Image (spheres, coloured by chain):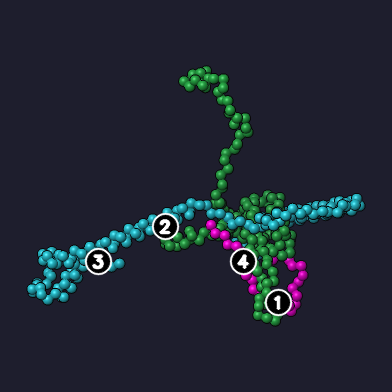
Chain colours: A cyan, B green
Amino acid sequence: AESVTPESLFLHALCTFFSCSSWLPQRVPLQGSHWQSSLLDLRTSLPVRAQPKKKKKVDVKKEQAQKERMKKRIKKLEKAAPELIPIEDFITPLKYSESNRVRSLPALSPEESERRVLLMKKWCLFKQKQDEAEKKAIKAVVESQQEALKELRLESEELYQAAIRRDEGLFPFQRDGPSYTPPLPGYDPPEGKCIDITKVYTQ
Amino acid sequence: DALLGCHRSYRSQPTHGIGKFKYLLPKEGPKKRKEKVQMKEISAGTEYQYGDVNIQMTSYDLCLVEHFAQYVHRLCNRLSIRVNESYAMPTKTNEVLFLEERGSKMQLDAVLTTHQRVVQIRGLSSTFAPILLEIIQSSQPEGVHLLVKQHTEADFKSRLKSRPELEELLSQMS
């Protein structure tokens, strides 16, 4: 918006009026006090002055009211706490809970049940041995690390301090799990694409 | 007697307090208010300790990833590493289409769901971190992708629902 002063507008209006009207007697061009003007000038000047002021007031008020309304809306939305996206894994689909069908299992013979119990015991023993071996391995590793650090300390204090510090290059750390079979040599996969159809939740 | 001292006559009557039973019921605790989902402070850690670290396990197989997450959580408990949170990230669904040998139409091959579990730990010492990584790697099952990284605010925000209206209004304001 151009900065329009009433005085400049008044001058502009007066000049146009001056140029278009020929019946006015020769007038002295504006020099300083233009307040001593004829009645005609006054009549044309008043409406010209009033219009731009009206526009300004209405615009500013409207803009202010709009801004306030937006601020109120933002405050209202911000008041509501953000929600976590629901995880589909933990929601059982309805079709599995509606039906009442029950599985009828065949009766087990005593040999079969005994075999199963013994198998379970063997599995438990195997798992226990596995777990104990893991604990032992962890303990051994930690102990050897502590011994190494002790020896390092005896060697040089500086290196020990540097070794104790945390490694910034360690994270982020990525590793793919092992695969059942190695990749086939010379396999030509068919062309295709992947489309992400995850449901987008909005609050 | 306090009952007789007051000016209301019925409070001294033998039937005063008839019908009261709430004093017989067990006392209810304070009302459970819905806890607002707020971000907990992310610790940066000292020179000899890592701050909040996220161990993220991703896979197409739900059971494997769940069991692996439970294993990692129990391992951290056993090694007395503080576990802040153990949560699941939202599932992602992908449609895999492949081009037929003779033809230009794309055929639907499968609908795969990617599951992710996160175990957040704090106070991991710098000397023990490589040992922990070794243990987790040695027991990593097939098809489970492991990612260990520092916890950031962006990670937390990715769990929350998007608010398009609020973002629109904020962008309009500025």
Q: Which residue is mark 3?
A: A4
Q: Which residue is mark 1?
A: A189
Q: Chain of mark 2?
A: A
State the residue in front, B61 or B111. Answer: B111
- Over which residues does the magenta segment extend? A176-203
Q: Nearer the viewer, mark 3 or mark 2?
A: 2
Circle on res. A70? 2
Residue in the picture at 74% in, 53% down: A100
Q: Nearer the viewer, mark 2 or mark 1?
A: 2
Give the secondary structure at mark 2: helix
Task: Say whether residue B13 is magenta.
Answer: no
Compute the Cα span from label 4 to label 2: 34 Å
Compute the Cα span from label 2 to label 1: 54 Å
Residue in the picture at 66% in, 63% down: B114
Q: Which residue is mark 4?
A: A197
The answer to whether marks 3 and 4 mark residues whose Cβ atoms lie closer than 8 Å is no
- Mark closest to the chain's N terminus, 3 or 2: 3
Is residue B85 something that shows in the picture? Answer: yes
- Residue B80, given in percent of the width and then of the height, sits at 68, 49
Circle on res. A25? none
Where on the picture, by quarter, is residue B138?
A: bottom right
Is residue B68 something that shows in the picture? Answer: no
Where on the picture, by quarter, is residue B91?
A: bottom right
Q: Chain of mark 3?
A: A
- Mark closest to the chain's N terminus, 4 or 2: 2
